[in-house]
Amino acid sequence: TQLLEQSPQFLSIQEGENLTVYCNSSSVFSSLQWYRQEPGEGPVLLVTVVTGGEVKKLKRLTFQFGDARKDSSLHITAAQPGDTGLYLCAGKAVSSSNTGKLIFGQGTTLQVKP
Amino acid sequence: DAGVIQSPRHEVTEMGQEVTLRCKPISGHDYLFWYRQTMMRGLELLIYFNNNVPIDDSGMPEDRFSAKMPNASFSTLKIQPSEPRDSAVYFCASSLSGGYNEQFFGPGTRLTVL
């Protein structure tokens, strides 16, 4: 069974702090996505990374795909209350590259206090 | 552009009653997914369709759950009879084959079974 493990599960920080969320697996993924979910809404795609070692930046968010394409990280600089939400990583496994199925991590709940 | 549409947004029912959740995917998308989200288990894939055909229903909890996709613009998830442990938020998502299969989620249906 392919799994994506996220850590930490919960994170509560003060506005202005930096944080990193990790997404790890023993399986290789052809691509990996990060989603953010706000209360009462569905997850919304933030970014897709596809190349080992790839780094993508979205304003204060930096996403990295591991060299071996088994892990990823999300780093937020100077967190703001608007960053509060559930962050989910999701991967497209190499073994299921001909399907539309994604493997989702359990999520990291982030609370940024003003 | 309209995103994924789900109805109802909230459903409260009594144990033993039949519940039907509805989803309209984004026009042109050929994959449709049904997920269930709880605090304990996170986001779980129940079933997904490709071109209206069910591909993988291994996540459907038991025979009380059934899903149909009679055409490309409509899908239903039915629970009969419902039980309190079915209480959760149910999401529908759609995606387009090719590329990285980014999924677009609806706003979800919050189901409470009393």
Image: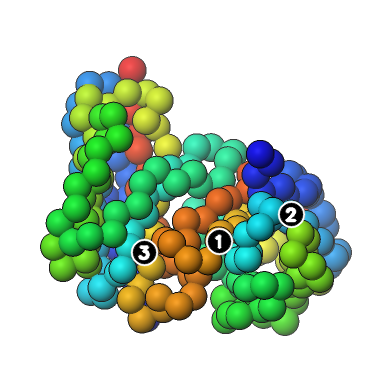
Image height of A114 relative to B1, above or below? above
Left or right: residue A110 versus residue B96 is left
- Identify residue type, mark 2: Lys
Residue under label 1, please give it: B96
Left or right: residue A77 versus residue B101 is left
Crowd tier of the residue under label 1, counting other residues whose Cα lies within 10 Å: few below 14, some 14–19, many 20 or above? some
Tag 1 secondary structure: loop
Q: Chain of mark 3?
A: A
For the N terminus of chain A, the image quarter is bottom left
Crowd tier of the residue under label 3, counting other residues whose Cα lies within 10 Å: few below 14, some 14–19, many 20 or above? many
Tag 2 secondary structure: strand
Q: Residue at x 47, y 61 (%)?
A: B101
Q: Residue at x 81, y 71 (%)?
A: B70
Residue under label 3, please give it: A91
Q: Quadrant of residue A23?
A: bottom left
Q: Are marks 3 and 2 on the same chain?
A: no
Instruction: Find residue B24 and name its label.
Output: 2
Q: Chain of mark 2?
A: B
Does any portion of residue B24 appear in the rendered image? yes
Label 3 and label 2: CA atoms lie apart by 24 Å
